[in-house]
Structure formats: C-alpha cells, structure tokens
C-alpha cells in the first residue's frame, strides 16, 4: 500500500485541490484545540515549576528557562502530536474506513484511480507541512500561557520570566522538535490511513479501526520519541 | 465484448468460482443471476479487477486484463463504468461533482465542457437540474441514477451493474432496468448486470448466465428461461408463490 501512496498523482490539479482541502481539515481546524491546550498547559507548567523551585538559592530565571525547555523539547512536539493522533488520526481512519465499507474506494479503483495515493498522499503532505506550523504555534502559546500565569499569580517578575526564556538558548532544540514533529505527522497519517484502508465489514469495524489508529499511532509516537531523543540529543 | 475464461477462485477452503467461462456480448444487457452467495459478485469483481482470480483470464476485446501491468489496467479501467449496489457516491461531493469526478481525473476538458457533459448525463437519467443536491438528500432510486450518470460520464465501453435494483420498489426498479437497457443500446456498450430480481431478468435479459455453487449452471435468453427444464434454475425462478401461481 505504501508504494501505491507514493506514486505520482493522476492529475496535479486534482491533487492540489485535495491538498488545500486537507490543509483546512488537518491543519486549520486543529488550530483551536492546539491553542487552548498549549496556553493552559504552559500556564500549569509554569505554576508547577514555580511551586517546586521555591528556593532563594535558585535563580528566578530558572522558571522561564524550565518552561521553555519543557515546551520546546517535549510538550509541544510530543504531547500535541499525541492529541493530533486522537483528533486527526481518528478522522482519517473513519473517513477512509467509511469509504471502504460503502464501496467508494472500490468505485475509485474501477475508475482506474490509484485510491491509496488519491486518499492518503494529500493528507500526508498536509500533515507533514502543517503540523510543524501547529507545533511552533504551540511553543509560542505555551510560553505565553506561562507568562500570563506568572503575571496573574505573581509567581515571578515579567523580566525574570522573559530573561529565563532567553537564557542558555540552543537553536538545535527547535530543530530537534520540528524533526520529531514531521516524523510524528508521518506516523499519524500512515497508521490511520492504513487502518481505514484495510477495513472489511461495516460500521462496527469503522469504529474499531478508528480506535486502533489512535492507539497504534500513540504507541509509535512514544516509541519514536524515545528513539529520536536518543539519536538527536 | 468481454470474455471470462476458466475463472476459478477460492476463499480459504471455499471454492467460490469453479472454472467459469462466459462471453458477455457487446450492445446487449448480459445478466448474471443466481442466489445470494452463489458467486455473482465475486465473478463481477474479478471481471473489473477488484479481485484477482486464482486461475483463468478476463479478455476485454482481445486484451488480456489479467496479464496487464498496473498502468495498463488503470488505462483500461477508464473504459469501465460501474454501478455499485449502494451507489457508492462520494459523500462529500454534490451530484454534479460526483458525475464530474471522472472527467476531472481523466480529461483535459474545460469547465464549460465538463458542465455540459454532466448536464447531458443527468438529463439522460432524468435528473436534470439536481446538480447541487448532496447524496444525503437523494432517494435510493436517485442515488442509483446519479451513479449511472457518473458511470457513463466518460463514455465507457463496458458497464457493470451490481444488483441495481436492491432496496428499490418495483416501479423504481423498472425505471432503472429500462434506463440500463436504453443506455446499453444507445451507446453500444457491453453491459453486465448482477441480479436476482426476476422482473429485471424478464425485462432486460438478452443474454443470461445462471450461476450456482460457483459454476455456470445454465445460459440462455429471457425467452428461453421460462421454458427451461433445468431443475435448479426452475427452483430459483419459481421460488415465490407469485411466480409459481403464474406458471400454473
């Protein structure tokens, strides 16, 4: 199936239309949930760091620094990808699965359309290009959420938090995070697409495939997270 | 003309097609009839390439479909129109977009030309002006007619219909049967219809293959089918009280 996915699309204009549609469904429609979760998680993270590092011996910069490192290295790429595995993965598996059980995929094939390529490739390209945008936004909002928490709850000063965010900054951490994001996006779309594509049966199997897609992609994300961290950091 | 030559297929231990050979003639409505589970759908899916037979060949006007590479197959499949049992319309597309889909994929027609072709096809199935409706807004009969319009949009040489009357009332069934027959004659298509509806058999069956336990048990025309002495076929045709009474 994967070989079929990566073949040249039958018509580029149709592929382009599909791609724009997937940017909307996979990317734009995920902006809201990513924004809300990132902001609140950033705020909670900041509160917890401030609560745990409440010592005159530790520099106040450490709150901003810890929040930044946690958000960039782990929270934005991994946790948000896990959330996207639930939101996007289940949608992809159920959409393709429903097309399979209602013979829409058979209809594509009898027309001479490469159905795996037609259905999965636009989703894959959209996720691989748009998920990094979501993750960068998540990083920014996570740190902003932390700032808001600092100011509202008087955890540390504005200057100390912002200085902490800028302290000991290594640009590689962002690159590492984006590399992880792209690989996680690939996992989410291919695992979910595969689970939907191979369905046999009816509505019950569509539900099962959707659940399987989320579980399998989440486990793979966690495993690859470990592997990539070992390789890249 | 489509020729099935010695097709055999098994699912696990179960022999579903057993050395099936049959010629589906051009310009005729060729019917495959038989009980549920007799192998009709498997035969049709083998003919269009959705299933791969274990043995045998499918020949489309001298072109061996089973020996073709993936690109050649896809090229030939563009000459095939298929009406699925449930219609298989794309849920997210309107009636117009569904019928236009094969044109978008395989032609370089301008939007105006494509729209003209879509309107012609929809008119042909008596659905003129329903372009903007979504599949969820259509009745069962309308779904089948849109599916026929989509199947003929690329001027196919071969038309396959898998149980076109399933789930339809007798009047709508008759309309669909008549439409398939008219289109077959008008465009000189080789049409293959899977059915177990005896009304369809008697209305449209110019060439009939009766399939039983994976084998072609009987073949003939609609005129011959009522006078056959084939016991298994008679049991199938006169299975209902109504047909038994009519026979008496």
Image (tube, coloured by chain):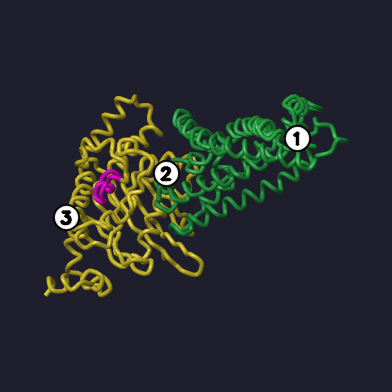
Chain colours: A green, B yellow
- Residue A217 in the figure: left or right of residue B113: right
Say if B97 sits above or below A202 in the image.
Answer: above
Dot in front, 2 or 1: 1
- Tally of marks: 3
Instruction: Return the mark for residue A69.
Output: 1
Say if A57 sits above or below A210 in the image.
Answer: above
Say if A211 sits above or below A89 in the image.
Answer: below
| Among the 4 quarters of the image, the one containing residue A77 | top right
Location of residue A207 in the rendering, given as x and y in whole percent from the top left corner: 49, 55
Location of residue B111 in the rendering, given as x and y in whole percent from the top left corner: 33, 26
- Look at 48% across and 39% down and name the residue there: A118
Q: Residues within 10 Å of mark 1 (few under 14, many from 20)?
A: some
Have a look at marks 2 and 3 and say if they share a chain.
no
Which region shows up in magenta?
A: B137-147
Secondary structure under the numbered disc 3 in the rendered image: helix
> Which of these two is toward me, A156 or A222?
A156
| Among the 4 quarters of the image, the one containing residue A65 | top right
Name the chain letter of the residue that bears numbered label 3.
Answer: B
Q: Residues within 10 Å of mark 2 (few under 14, many from 20)?
A: many
Give the Cα distance between marks 2 and 3: 30 Å
Does residue A17 appear anywhere in the picture?
Answer: yes
> Which of these two is toward me, B37 or A199?
A199
Secondary structure under the numbered disc 2 in the rendered image: helix
| Secondary structure character of the magenta stretch overall | helix
Q: Decide whether residue B188 is among the magenta residues.
A: no
Name the chain letter of the residue that bears numbered label 2.
Answer: A
Dot in front, 3 or 1: 1
Instruction: Return the mark for residue A108.
Output: 2
Have a look at marks 2 and 1 and say if they share a chain.
yes
**Residue highlighted by disc 3:** B171
Name the chain letter of the residue that bears numbered label 1.
Answer: A
Location of residue B106 in the rendering, given as x and y in whole percent from the top left corner: 40, 33
């Amino acid at each position: 199936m994967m070989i079929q996915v990566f073949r040249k699309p039958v018509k580029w204009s149709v592929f382009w239309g599909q791609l724009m549609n997937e940017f909307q469904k996979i990317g734009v429609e995920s902006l809201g949930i990513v924004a809300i979760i990132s902001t609140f998680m950033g705020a909670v993270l900041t509160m917890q760091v401030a609560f745990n590092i409440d010592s005159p011996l530790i520099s106040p910069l450490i709150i901003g620094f810890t929040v930044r490192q946690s958000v960039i290295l782990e929270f934005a790429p991994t946790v948000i990808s896990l959330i996207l595995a639930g939101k996007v993965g289940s949608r992809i598996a159920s959409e393709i699965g429903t097309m399979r059980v209602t013979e829409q995929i058979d209809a594509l094939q009898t027309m001479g359309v490469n159905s795996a390529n037609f259905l999965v490739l636009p989703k894959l390209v959209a996720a691989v290009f748009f998920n990094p945008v979501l993750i960068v936004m998540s990083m920014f909002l996570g740190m902003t959420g932390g700032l808001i928490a600092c100011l509202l709850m008087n955890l540390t000063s504005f200057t100390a938090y912002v200085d902490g965010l800028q302290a000991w900054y290594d640009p590689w951490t962002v690159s590492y995070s984006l590399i992880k994001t792209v690989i996680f996006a690939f996992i989410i779309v291919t695992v979910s697409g595969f689970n939907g594509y191979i369905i046999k049966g009816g509505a019950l199997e569509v539900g099962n495939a959707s659940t399987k897609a989320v579980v399998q992609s989440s486990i793979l994300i966690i495993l690859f997270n470990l592997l990539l961290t070992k390789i890249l950091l | 003309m489509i020729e099935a030559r010695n097709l055999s297929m098994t699912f696990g231990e179960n022999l579903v097609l057993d050395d099936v050979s049959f010629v589906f003639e051009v310009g005729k409505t060729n019917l495959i009839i038989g009980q549920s589970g007799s192998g009709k759908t498997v035969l049709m899916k083998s003919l269009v390439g959705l299933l791969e037979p274990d043995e045998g060949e499918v020949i489309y006007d001298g072109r061996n479909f089973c020996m073709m590479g993936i690109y050649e197959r896809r090229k030939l499949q563009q000459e095939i129109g298929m009406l699925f049992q449930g219609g298989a319309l794309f849920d997210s597309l309107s009636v117009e977009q569904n019928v236009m889909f094969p044109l978008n994929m395989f032609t370089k027609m301008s939007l105006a030309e494509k729209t003209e072709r879509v309107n012609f096809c929809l008119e042909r199935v008596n659905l003129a002006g329903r372009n903007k409706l979504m599949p969820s807004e259509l009745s069962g009969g309308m779904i089948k007619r849109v599916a026929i319009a989509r199947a003929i949009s690329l001027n196919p040489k071969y038309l396959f219909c898998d149980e076109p009357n399933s789930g339809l009332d007798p009047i709508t069934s008759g309309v669909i049967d008549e439409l398939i027959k008219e289109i077959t004659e008008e465009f000189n298509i080789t049409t293959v219809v899977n059915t177990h509806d005896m009304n369809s058999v008697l209305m449209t069956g110019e060439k009939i293959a009766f399939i039983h336990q994976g084998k072609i048990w009987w073949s003939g025309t609609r005129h011959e089918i009522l006078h056959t002495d084939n016991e298994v076929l008679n049991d199938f045709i006169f299975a209902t009280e109504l047909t038994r009474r009519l026979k008496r």
